[in-house]
Image (spheres, rainbow, N blue to C red):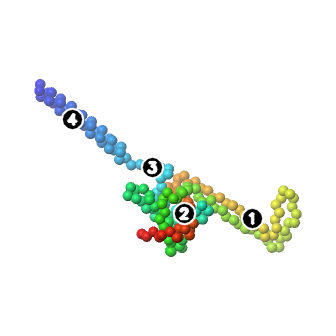
């Protein structure tokens, strides 16, 4: 009789400890699960290198050469390459990541094309009120806006920094 009670007690203890260890294993598996998909607003750091940086006037002032992380894994600074030709003579400066405004849409480019009337063509001297008058040598300006979808991109199209190229060149150079 005592052996039956002892066997039941051991069996009950073993079944309870098995259930407890199964719960622990499940909670550990849930906490270490890694993401399996790219989320909107997450960018690949490898793709940030090379992204162009513009000022508010849509003038290119440099491009991103490196992304610097702090010990916690957060982006602290980006290293911009300013000036130079084909990477030669570039001035590298560190800019805080939060100073950059990230834009997913392409830069709005304004292109002006100038067309003139042929030199032999006579200029119209009178036109109806609803028509446009043109004289020889008059220029026509065309504005073109380029837009593409960046919804599937793993990085922003460009960044905007409120600084000029001269201000960036005047900053202390970042040394590797």
Q: Which of labels 3 and 1 is toward the front? A: 1
Left or right relative to 32: residue 130: right
Image location (x, y in percent) of residue 4: 14, 27
Q: CA distance from mark 4 to mark 2?
A: 64 Å
Q: CA distance from mark 4 to mark 3?
A: 40 Å
Mark 1 or mark 2: name the one nearer the start of the chain: 2
Mark 4 or mark 3: name the one nearer the start of the chain: 4
Q: Which of labels 3 and 2 is toward the front? A: 2
Q: Which of labels 4 and 2 is toward the front? A: 2
Mark 3 or mark 2: name the one nearer the start of the chain: 3
Q: Secondary structure at mark 3?
A: loop
Q: Are marks 4 and 1 in contact (CB under 8 Å)?
A: no
Q: Secondary structure at mark 1?
A: loop
Q: Secondary structure at mark 4?
A: helix
Left or right relative to 62: residue 117: right
Mark 3 or mark 1: name the one nearer the start of the chain: 3
* Disc sitting over residue 140 in the figure: 1
- Inspect this view and state whether residue 169 appears: yes
Q: Nearer the viewer, residue 105 or 151?
A: 105
In this rendering, the answer to whether 42 lies above or below 112 is: above
Q: Nearer the viewer, residue 113 or 103?
A: 103
Q: Quadrant of the N terminus?
A: top left
Report the residue marked by disc 4: 14
Report the residue marked by disc 2: 53
Image location (x, y in percent) of residue 153: 52, 55
Report the residue marked by disc 3: 37
- Inspect this view and state whether residue 47 appears: no
Q: Quadrant of the C terminus?
A: bottom left
Q: Are marks 4 and 3 in contact (CB under 8 Å)?
A: no
Label 1 neighbourhood size at 10 Å, few (<14), some (14-19), many (20+)? few
Left or right relative to 155: residue 123: right
């Amino acid at each position: 009789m005592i052996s039956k009670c002892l066997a039941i007690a051991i069996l009950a203890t073993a079944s309870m400890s098995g259930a407890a260890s199964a719960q622990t294993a499940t909670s550990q598996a849930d906490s270490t699960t890694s993401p399996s998909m790219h989320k909107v607003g997450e960018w690949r750091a490898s793709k940030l290198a090379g992204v162009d940086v513009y000022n508010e006037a849509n003038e290119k002032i440099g491009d991103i050469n490196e992304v610097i992380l702090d010990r916690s894994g957060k982006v602290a600074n980006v290293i911009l390459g300013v000036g130079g030709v084909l990477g030669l003579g570039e001035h590298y400066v560190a800019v805080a990541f939060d100073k950059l405004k990230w834009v997913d849409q392409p830069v709005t480019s304004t292109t002006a094309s100038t067309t003139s009337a042929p030199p032999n063509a006579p200029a119209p001297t009178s036109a109806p009120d609803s028509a446009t008058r043109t004289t020889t040598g008059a220029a026509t300006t065309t504005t073109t806006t380029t837009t593409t979808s960046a919804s599937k991109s793993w990085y922003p199209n460009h960044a905007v920094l409120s600084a000029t190229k001269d201000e960036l060149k005047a900053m202390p150079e970042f040394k590797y």
